[in-house]
Image: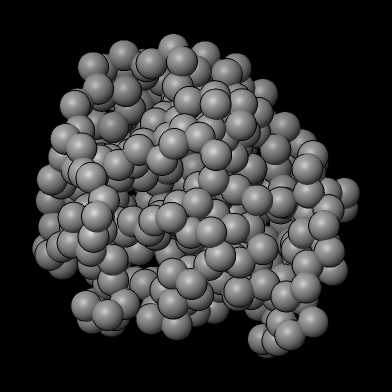
Amino acid sequence: MTGTKLLLFVALSPVWAANTLDIHFIDVEGGQATLIVTAGGQSLLVDAGWPGFNGRDADRIVAAARKAGLKQIDYLMTTHYHRDHVGGAEALAEKFPIGTFVDHGPNRETGKAPDELWASYERALAKSKRLIVKPGDRIPLKGAEMTVVTADGEMIRSPLAGAGQENPLCASAERKAEDPTENARSTGVLVRFGQFRFLDIGDLTWNKEIELVCPVNRIGKVDLYLTTHHGADTSGPAAIVHALRPRVAIMNNGARKGGSPSAWQVIKSAPGLEDFWQVHFAMAGGKENNVAEEQIANLEENCQGHGLSVSAKENGEFTVSNGRNSVSKTYRRR
């Protein structure tokens, strides 16, 4: 942050801004709940956090939705069927209207815990419509273009517009053991608003990420990158992170979940990276593997649940704001 001018964040009024795409990274303490509000006033929530904790995550999502001026969540996209992503869906559906659930189809994991999680999800589904997606599909929101790039272990076959370049990092990319879990089946989306591009691929794991960008990069460059799998070292090889060349990365880690030092270093060293923000200080990383405190939403393990927000313009300019300390920074159009 040396030499960087920090601007005071002015709180948004509880009405969606007609000329921006707004993204709210809600703190669900190591899970995911990313609320996207389009320039057309429609919304997509990516995942619903954890179950339990006296409805903590559902309450935080509802508070963020109301602050954004929403009366319902138009689409709730479940990236995959793990407790930290879909566990809060049933509680949320009881507290706030959800128009359509989006997912990759059936849960591919079986056993007592997965079956109980699936039963909870089915109870939430009973209150709304459902849309099962595959790579290449579009989520029909007004005011932004949202393309599904991964789902159920598959991925887009053809490069997106502007992508398709050969990826030189593939030659040295080492693979890990195959992941049989729902993580590898994560549904991921590329969000485009004019010249602004944001990628969220859930908890997609190492080998699948390499497949997505090798031998050619089918995604291209992005402005904003949500670190895969909360910054865990089972995801995020340089082959994808460096090929994406994100201008800004946001890590939705918990104090003791994600934020692996090795994964953090891959992100920090990405070519063209202008900045890096975190939802939590990663206890495992120490000072040397965490960003500056002013760019971390929660410094304490027992936190107040502060989040990060992004407001993007069609020309590619966007601002990241920290809900804890009212610090924000604007990244000008390229």
Position of the N terminus, as image quadrant, is: bottom left
Q: Residue at x 83, y 49 (%)?
A: 159
Q: Is residue 91 left or right of residue 300?
A: right
Of the pair 227 and 265, the residue shown nearer to us: 265
- Residue 163: x percent and y percent? 78, 49
Q: Residue at x 53, y 67 (%)?
A: 270
State whether residue 116 is above or below residue 93: below
State whether residue 190 is above or below residue 70: below
Residue 165, picture quadrant: bottom right
Colouring chosen for the image of the structure = one colour
Of the pair 134 and 107, the residue shown nearer to us: 134
State whether residue 246 is above or below residue 180: above
Q: Residue at x 23, y 60 (%)?
A: 2
Q: Residue at x 59, y 40 (%)?
A: 197
- Residue 176: x percent and y percent? 67, 86
* Residue 243 appears anywhere in the view: yes
- Residue 217: x percent and y percent? 77, 59
* Residue 79 appears anywhere in the view: no
Q: Is residue 75 left or right of residue 161?
A: left
- Residue 294: x percent and y percent? 18, 55
Residue 240, picture quadrant: bottom right
Position of the C terminus, as image quadrant, is: top right
